[in-house]
Structure formats: structure tokens, C-alpha cells
Amino acid sequence: MDNAATIVEQDPNQLTADTAAKLLKAFPCCFLYNKGEQRADGTLAPGKDPKGKGWPDNPQRRWNGRGVGVICGPVPEHEAPPVYGLDFDIVYSKPAKAMLEWLEGFIAGKQGFALSRVGKAPKTLIPFTIDDSEPLRKINSEKFYPVGSAEMDDAEKCQLEILGAGNQFVAYHAHPDTGEPYRWDMFGTGFIDQLYDTEPGELLKLTRDDLAEIQAAFEHLMVGHGLESSRSIKARLADEKKQGATPTNKPTHNASGEVVSYTGHTISELLDYIPNGGDVDYDEWLAVLAAINEATSGSGEHEARRWSASNGSKHDEDKFNKTWASLGEYTGPRRDLATLVYLAKKNGLPTRKKADPASINPETIFSDDKDNEEPARPGDFIIPQSCKGSFVVQLGAEIARVTEMPESTVVMTTMAALSGILSTTYTTGYPDGARLPIGMNVVAEQPPGAAKSRALNKIIKPWLKSVKQYNAKETERVEAANEENEGEQEKPFYITYPISNATPEAVEQVMTKANTGHFFLQSAEQGLVKILFGDGQKDRPKNFDLALKGFNGEFHAGCRVTRDKIEREVYGAVVCFAQAGSIKTILNNSDGDGLAERFIHIAEPHRLGQRTHDTGPMSEWMEHEYQALISQVLMDFQGIDEKGDLDSLKYLGFSSKANGIIQKYKIRLEPKMQLHADNGENSMTAFLAKADIQARKMAAVMYLSDCLSAGKPRLATIPDDYLNAAIELTDAALGHIEQVLTSLERMGPDAAKSAIYRQFDRKDGRTARELKQNLKKVKPFKDHATPYAYIERIIKGMVNRGDLIYDPADKKLRLG
């Protein structure tokens, strides 16, 4: 029998006998009850509490298959430094994200290794040690709830608990709410790195002053993200009780059907007391819109627009429309009628006796809705047959098989992730000798639950572990060399870890400290592109320089975050494998800046509902070959003299014949470029203009993957067969990108018609002059060489087909 067929991949977030033994040896541990298990006193356990009396002083030595917690503080007969926990019990994603981003910057440069544990996102725990022999006792911050809350519901509570002596935190167990295992990763990277592989003395080291600063930052950020402290809520509720009011979040209606608060005020009356001047920031503006939306069940758009427009020139109609349409996906702190009452009372709303609402039973008239056609969606992205023999394509296909995801999506993500790894050491170039980084940028979309993180980790995790080992050996090597050399001391050169979430300025800071021009950004969350490219970042200008210049290996000079400035050629890769919206984020942020066309955009149909969950493990041969590839990359990197400089990387060129191949390819693309340019579809024109660069990068990645995985010697010139295959793959990618842009109404006749239809959303009739004036600044017309002529042509066609009707009486166009 083939034993390999019975191998089942082990989830590293679930203990085995071996990993549990390592954990219990390194940390003082207790065992945990399962959810619903009966305790000794007959009560049922919630699923996270310690089992057994005296557990703080009696660490377990032998695992019995139970969930395991780590005991905080000093423990008898346990010599390792006491461990404590920063438990960020934040139930809302935006304040949680803001807190962790602040913390990531705060702990940069501090000693120790920061791990983070997530049970039910976005709640996070980070273990630490303290440079103080005095035991740390538990510290609780103020509790915070949504602004205007009429009651303090624990399900909406946000609090920082600094776990001290006598506490424990769950290390490995099934979360009682989700049923999924708690998971560990390296804080700020998104990569799995387990607690059982870490010693207490290696954990993040903090001081008591650090803890006080973290607590202060937590309380400040919670207020800044629209939460109200329990102290403030208690005082407010007591005051309202004195005035005889009975606060409630539930709206009633008056005889006219208007929503009325418990104070008797309508939504419009409340909004008259909520200022919307120049000092109202985006978060405050969003909070009011979200509250109106919730209080009116989505029907309060008129009131919301009136309030927003009261800010005069600061009101942006397009921004308002997009925000209102997105409120169905709002995940911030709860906003409702009580929020509006709270904000209005802060600004002088008079108390008024609540009136009894009239009985409402309005006559309802139904009419058949016109069927809405579902927008076109991109189809499958077909990998050309000429590429399927390459190792990187086979590796991606194998990962797709195991994760049951669209094959081409995973193949292109794998290729881009591998390009980020290979670009540390190798480069290619142009016919004139100028160097071209081989790092690729890919943004791929799949829905939640499609195993995006699992697929990306198949590529990144082996590299991460190898880099960790390489950096440790580099430390040992330099220390040994410096002990023998009494003169100038050598400094180690570390390979930086891939980054999963950071601003461009923060990435530059990391590169400056590491003395390298290389960057590698990757994530299975769309937060990567939102943070990196400034979407939704208040008061922060867009900064694409790193991504723009890193694509071609151009010189980059920046000085923003610290006094240290980056002045060098930069090169690297960006890989975002996330949910729907990532592509739109990049397209929205790239408006003639050249950002979007430096990415390959992939949005294949998902496989949910078709999966068997019985695919077996990865091919052992494939994993072995991939590890061999990584080992060879690190060996070649070690041999580079001036590490971190593009000009010092190992160079792979193209043949003289290849220059002719590229020339013919560019000539073949010229008619397509002209067609898209004439139609004002500049986005697609820009993608076509970068096609030859994408092909060179793909050829280099495929060739290197074949040589390094099989241990074959590399030629100084990439064979032409790889370039021809890469051109076919680039053509396939461009065809898919065209489908993506069409589905997002960024190009094609449908995009033009949709833009015209939207002009009638707020007004029944429009004159031709109105339409031309309004549409000249709207895509796809704004990019056209003659936008007025293009608008006229589309409108005349719509009139001929009956989509629009012209009324000569008032000279207005109306929907047909």
C-alpha cells in the first residue's frame, strides 16, 4: 500500500502530541474546558475557562488532547520569564485595524518577537514579557460602546485587557463561537508562526511605561472611531432619566410616516442640530450617514443628502452616492437613531415630550419592477498550453487542485508571489542594457471562504521559514567574523520579511533600515491595497511612487516618515489575493498615474458549491522541488557582493532574436491601442503599452523556476521559447483584463450608456447641453480626445434605438 496516499495535511493551529510537548515544556500551561462541558460544580463551561483547582500554580506537564491555555505571571518551578497578554477585545473592524496599525509602529525596534493570536476576528491577543521582576497584575481599560447607546451590551463592548498574574490566555483550542481553531501569526505580516515554536524569552519585551502608553492610545483611538466610554454613557443616561425620558433605539412614526425619536423629533429636526461645518471629518460624516440609514431602514437618502450638502463646497455628490450605496456593507460601530439623538443633544437639542405615534396603515401600491440585467462578469482565464510545462505553472496548478480554486487565478498569483522571492536575487533587462526587475504585480479576487489565505501561504510560508533560518545564520556568521576581526566590524545583511499591510512611507522606512531597494508586499486581504494606495485614508495624499518606480527599477527618493531617507533604485512585487473590491480600489485610485496598468487583474468565477473537500495533500515531489528552488535562491543571494542594489543582482538577458520578437509583438498591438484610444478607453491602452514588460518578467520567472527547482545550470540568456510562451500568457492576461474592465463599466459601449443612464437618477429630464457638460468629466468620456463628439455619438445611437426619447416641447431627453 502506498502510505503517501494516507497523508493528511496537519493544521498548524491544532496541536499534535509533538507540538503540544514543545508548548508545555516552554510555557506554563493549563487545560481548558470545552464549550458546554459540565464543571465540577455542575454548571456548563463557556469553553475558554481553565480546568482544575489551583491551576495558576500547577502547570500541566503532559498533554491529554485538551485545549491549552498559557498561565500569565510567575509560576512555581518555572524558570522562563513570566508571560503576559495584551488582549484587544475590539468587536469592530475599523477601530481594531487602527489600533493594530498604531501598535505595529509603536513596537517597531523593540526587543523580542511579536506574535498575535486571533480567535474571533477582529479581536486580537499579543503575548509579551516585561522588564520588571515585580509581577504584573491585570489592568483593564475603560469600556467603550457605540455612541448614543441606550444600554451597554457586552456584545458591543470594546476593551483592552492587559492580562496579568492569575490570568491565562487561550493558546490552542476551538473558539466557542466560531468552532474554528485559534490561529497564530507573526504580528504585522499575516504569516503563520506558532507559539509552540517560540520560547518565552523570545517574545516581545515591554515596560510598564509602554503599557500605560498603549492603554492611553487605545482609549484615544476608540473615541476617535466613534465609540463612547461607559462612564460617559452612565452620566448621559442618568441625566436623561432625571428629565423623564426613556431612551430607546427603536424608531416610531408620526401620522405622516416620518421616523420619530423618543424625544419626539423627526430625523430632519435632529439633523438641524448636528453641525456639518468645515471641521467635521470623514468619520463623523460617515457616522451620521450610517445612523440615518439604519434609523430609516435605508429610506433616508433625501435627509442624508440635505444634511451632507449643508457643508457647501465640501460636499461631493459622487462621494455621497458611493458611500450611501455601500452602507449595506458597513461594519463599523453600531449607528442608529440613538446616535442622532446623542449628537443633536450635544449641540443644544431641546428635550421634548414624546408624542404617541399615530397608527400607520398606508395603502401600498405595487408595480412590476423592470428586470435588472446582471452586469457582465469576467470568464475563465485560460493558461496557454505553451506555459504548462514550466515549474511555476505546475506549482500553481497543484496548489489550485489542493485548495479547489480556479486554476489560472492561483497560477498567476503563484507566479507573482514567486517573482517577489526571485527579485531579491535576480533581474533581467532591456536591449540597451538597462535593468528590469522581474517582480510582478497581481491583484486577484475570490469570495470569502474560497481558501485564498491557504493558497497564498503555500507559496509564502516555506520562504518565510527559510528567510528566518537564513537571517539567524547570518547573525551567527557576522558575530563569528567580528570576534576574529579586531578592526572594522561587519554588519549583518538580513532579508526582509514580506509585508502584508503597510503605508508606502512605512515600507520605505523598513527598506531604509534594511539598506535594501527590494520590497515584497503580499496579502490575502484587500486592506493591503487600501492602505498601500491610500483608499479611505483620511488626510493622507496618494503616494504611488514605490509601486510605480519599483515596477521598472527606477530611482526613488523619499523622506517622509523619519529623518532617514531612501535614495536608491527600488524593485519588488505586490500580490493581493483578496475579496471583490480590490481591483476597483486600484482602478479608482489610479487616474492617469500609471498604477493600474502595472498590475495584472484577475477575477475568475469562483468554485464555491462545486468543491469536494477531498483533494488530499500537496505533491511531496512538488514541495521538495519548491524547497530546492528556495535554497538555491538563498545560496545565490549569499554570493551577491552589494546586496540590496538592483545593479548587483544576478542578470539574465534576452537574445538578439528576442528583440525582434518583442518588436513584432508591439507592432501587433498597435491597432488595438489605436482602437481603445479612439474610444477614450485609455485604461486598456495603458495595459497594452506595458505588455512587452509583462512578457519579459513572466519569461524570466518561468525560466528561473525551471532551472532552480531542478538544479539545472542557468544560461546568461533566457531561451526564446520562454519569451514566446510569456507573450501568449500576456495576451491571455490582457484578454481577461479587458473583460474585467468591461464588467466594471470602465470601457466599452455599455460603460458609456451606463454613464448616461446615471444622469437620470436624480432628474427626470435633461437637455443635451446638460448631458454634455455633466458627462465631459465622467469616464469613459473624460479620457476621449473629443469628449463632446463621443457623447453626441452615443446619445444619438440611444435615441435611434429608443433608449432615450427627445421631447421637442421642452427640448429635453428622457429615458425611453
Image (cartoon, rainbow, N blue to C red):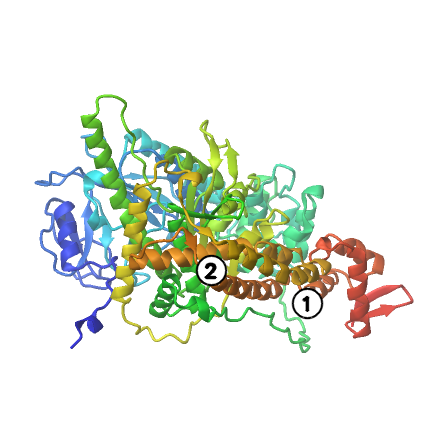
Nearest to the observer: residue 354 or residue 689: 689
Q: Position of residue 182 (x, y in %)?
A: 28, 56
**Residue where numbered disc 1 is placed:** 750
Q: Residue at x 34, y 67 (%)?
A: 398
Whether residue 153 sits left or right of residue 542 in the image: it is: left
Badge 1 element:
helix
Front residue of 718 and 285: 718
From the viewer's perspective, is residue 105 above or below residue 628? Answer: above
Amino acid type, residue under disc 1 in the picture: Asp
Other residues around mark 1 within 10 Å, as few (<14) / some (14–19) / many (≥20): some
* Residue under the point 43% across and 72% down: 607
Classify residue 134 by image quadrant: top left
Quadrant location of the C terminus?
bottom right
On the image, the x and y values in percent for residue 601 come to 52, 59
- Give residue 684's mark: none
> Quick one: label 1 or label 2, which is nearer the N terminus?
2
Q: Which residue bears the numbered disc 2?
A: 720
